[in-house]
Amino acid sequence: MKKRHLSVILLLFLSDLSYSDSAEKLTIFDASEIVTLDEEVKSADAVLVKSDRIIALGSLDDLTEQYPKASINHQFQNDVMVPGFIEHHIHPFLSAITMNAEIIAIEEWDLPNNQSRAYRDRDSYMQKLSEIERNMRVDVPLITWGFHHYFHGELTRDDLDRISNERPILVMHRSYHEFILNTPALEYFEISREFVESLDEEARAYADYDRGHFFEQGMVSVFPKLLKYLGKPEYLLSGLQLTEDYLHQNGVTMIANPGAWLIESLQKAKNFVLGDEDTPFRSFFFPSALILSEQYEESELIEQAEALLEWGEGKVEYLPNRIKLFSDGAMYSQNMVLKDGYLDGHHGAWLMQEDLYRSVFKLFWDAGFQIHIHQNGDEALDLILDVLEENLKRNPRKDHRTTIVHFGISGANQIERIKSLDAIISANPYYVTALSDLYSREGIGPERALEMVRLGDVNRAGIRFGLHSDMPMAPGAPLHLMHSAVNRINFANNVAGPKQRVPALSALEAVTIDAAYIMGLEKDYGSISIGKFANFTILSDNPLTIDPKLIKDIEIKSTVVEGKHYPITGN
């Protein structure tokens, strides 16, 4: 008899399980390689699944000998199996809008219903916008996404009026933190001068009615009015379905939406599409303290956050005791708050003013919530670390997993402080791909731009980190995120900050086990381990051994989610 794999022996010892005792069907999946990311069993060529859970892994010979009546599924025998990819920070609603918008962006997008090329200068952008407007039906607004002022130049209400002074045109910035509307759009969405003047002082500072420009807090104030069109059921549901299809095609087996919009009709639409039993992944949501604080008194925030646990349905659920806070503005808008400012003298923007941020952080900290904080600038990072340190001293907590989200600009001297405070990082490595070249010339200069998202320093310091797309801020494609983090090749085809590259293994962990850890779900997800859900992504090649420059081109063959196979169309 061949020597049994240690994991099989351990399983039998602990559970005294025999095949004859189980009425449930057992299935053995084999593959040419299985990358488990399990500390006990680092590699295998077969995994045994009972219902939705993994109960053993090892060699195909061992498992078939131990379970002679188990069915054997050979469909992945020539492929590479890795833990199911986790996209732990996307925005399904914004992605749905993007899917249905006219995309004129700084990179190519390959979407289920739309393939668009890159537009990186003003002339090509304006020509494409005008072309789209001329060829549209006369009775619909033009909704477009992807504009970026550092690539495409200044854009105002007057510019859009020259394209059409009859059709409503809504331009959504690449960051989704800014909107530009022409005169017919202002009228269509009922955004009047009187409405803008009625906003509170903070929002008015970011709302320019004459230029049709609304950003950061101004954007938040006008956004509900845009739902007149963007929230229409046929528009929203089709976009959500396309988002689902896109994520599946990219091997995603679980998503999270931190900071979801607190609009119940939108949540019902997400539940309807993403909560369906046939959806090939689970979705986990948690609320935004920024949005909650705009709707409720501070004394009500905990109660209102907990009330949202009832909002999920089916495969969509809200995670308890998680909250998202915000520090500074968008990276794509250059509204991050920087200690040394910008080359052109402009200033970033705070999304939550310091007094509000401090009081809300304390409130949720004392209630035992895991706090995720949107951050893009190094001055904002200092604020986050200062407040975290103050609260740790005042009310110590173990395993708090305070998460720094996006991690745009930071200083080398901040890394050790992050580690000492036991904070963790959820990074968007695509910032490097899209922005490091341009930002080295405009706005922040090469020293800061080329070192943005400094994951090499983070990895060497032993700080746990995950990778996310913040889709649609980046393609919701974990292999693309890995590629960005491992290679750091930007739009100029240069390596930005070579010392900030990370090994392929760290990048794979960042879209699997470390992503699960950030969500507090690592006991059930993130590795191919006994007792965890049977979530696998099936690839044509091993991302740990392939040429790193080819990671993003690996073919995604299929997924298995909770033991159920979800084929990818065309494979």
Image: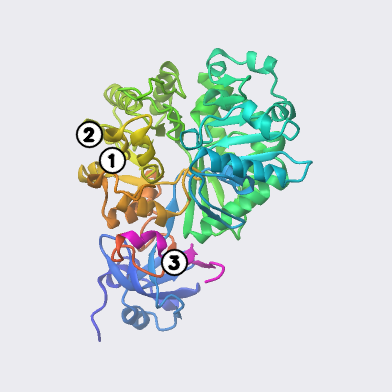
> Given the image, on which type of amino acid does mark 2 rest?
Ala
**Residue 83 coordinates in the image, percent (x, y):** 39, 61
Name the residue located 23 percent from the left edge and 31 percent from the top edge: 417
Residue topped by disc 1? 454
Badge 2 element: helix
**In this view of the protein, can residue 303 be seen by the observer?**
yes
Q: Nearer the viewer, residue 523 or 432?
A: 432
As displayed, is residue 388 above or below residue 103? above
Q: CA distance from mark 3 to mark 1?
A: 28 Å
**Residue 25 coordinates in the image, percent (x, y):** 49, 74
Badge 3 element: loop
Name the residue located 34 percent from the left edge and 27 percent from the top edge: 384
- Of the numbered discs 2 and 3, the one sitting upstream in the chain is 2
> Given the image, on which type of amino acid does mark 3 rest?
Glu
Do the residues under discs 1 and 2 have CB atoms within 8 angstroms?
Answer: yes
Q: Nearer the viewer, residue 162 or 224?
A: 162
Residue topped by disc 3? 555
Question: Does 161 sit left or right of 488 as displayed?
Answer: right
Q: Residue furthest right?
A: 139
Question: Does 308 sit left or right of 77 as displayed?
Answer: right
> Given the image, on which type of amino acid does mark 1 rest?
Arg
Segment colored magenta: 549-571
Question: Does 217 sit left or right of 489 as displayed?
Answer: right
Q: Quadrant of the N terminus?
A: bottom left
Q: Residue furthest front?
A: 123
Q: Residue furthest bottom?
A: 1
Q: Nearer the viewer, residue 255 or 163?
A: 163
Quarter-of-image position of residue 40:
bottom left
Is 569 part of what is drawn in magenta? yes
Return the mark for residue 412. 2
Do the residues under discs 2 and 3 have CB atoms within 8 angstroms?
Answer: no
- Of the numbered discs 3 and 1, the one sitting upstream in the chain is 1
